[in-house]
Amino acid sequence: MKLIIANWKMYLSIGESVALAKKFLDKLQKSKNEVVICPSFVALQTVYEVIKKNGIYLGAQDCGWGDEGAFTGEVSSKDLKQLGCKYVIIGHSERRHLMNESEELVNKKMITAMKSGLKPILCVGETAEERREGEAAKVVKRQLKSAFAGLPINSKPDIVLAYEPVWAIGTGIAAKPEDALTMHKIIREFVLKLVPKGSKLRILYGGSVTSKNTAEFLKEKEIDGFLVGGASARMDFVEIANH
Ligand code: PGA
């Protein structure tokens, strides 16, 4: 079973989100894969009403790093959990790069999310320049090390990571499956040293995934699924999720 996550970013209005979730239902409720939809904060509740009894899970695209208090504009992970979220995306490259989210902040969000009982989907990935300079693995390891510092990890954590090269997100240029695979192996080896033995670790690929390139990635056993942006806000997602 693969884990296939739709990251709807800020693509859809509340009405469009509910309409698309309804269209997905028939086609996804019997999927052999675990399917998760991450709508915008304001659409979480209404989308959840549509999917909750149909075997599709809800995720948020981000969460605040504080538990509660004076954090204007933030949304707590406790509330997200209460709304029905199972997962939360943390450290997405658009947040790291467009909103200047630091590695320290990503770590704080990981801690709060885990304390609230949400499963973080931690995103890591290098920029085009970092790859050109041969720094990709070093950057990804640094992001992982910092994100995992001081986590309230129980004895059997279920960890989801998404390798999303920044240069592949929203560009139409996906990583080559063999390059993704190389990085997945590096990530797996590195993270297994940071978490207790027997931890469940799933590593997804993200960055310009469409129904056209799904099969070549899934040939690689090490790729446990996808985090899909643009194509997830269209019916294309059904084909990706049912692969
Ligand atoms: P993309 O985005 O599929 O549009 O490239 C992936 C992501 O940002 O998670």
Image: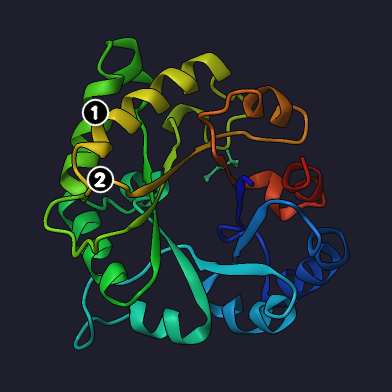
Mark 1 residue CB less than 8 A from any atom of ligand 1 = no
Q: Position of residue 239 (x, y in %)?
A: 81, 44
Q: Position of residue 101 (x, y in %)?
A: 26, 53
Label 1: few (<14), some or many (≥20) within 10 Å?
some
- The C terminus, quarter of image: top right
Quadrant field for ligand 1: top right
Q: Which corner quadrant of the image does residue 138 belong to?
A: top left
Query: To which residue does mark 1 refer?
Result: 139
**Residue at the image point whose x is 40% and y is 85% from the top:** 79
Left or right for 55, reference 141: right
Dot 2 amino acid type? Lys
Query: To which residue does mark 2 refer?
Result: 197
Left or right for 242, reference 168: right
Q: Position of residue 100 (x, y in %)?
A: 27, 50
**Answer yes or no: do the residues labelled 2 and 1 have beta carbons within 8 Å?**
no
Asked if residue 36 is positioned above or below residue 206 in the image, the reply reads: below
Q: Position of residue 92 (x, y in %)?
A: 40, 49
The residue closer to the viewer here, 97 or 212, is 212
> Nearer the viewer's eye, disc 2 or disc 1?
2
Q: Which mark is residue 231?
A: none
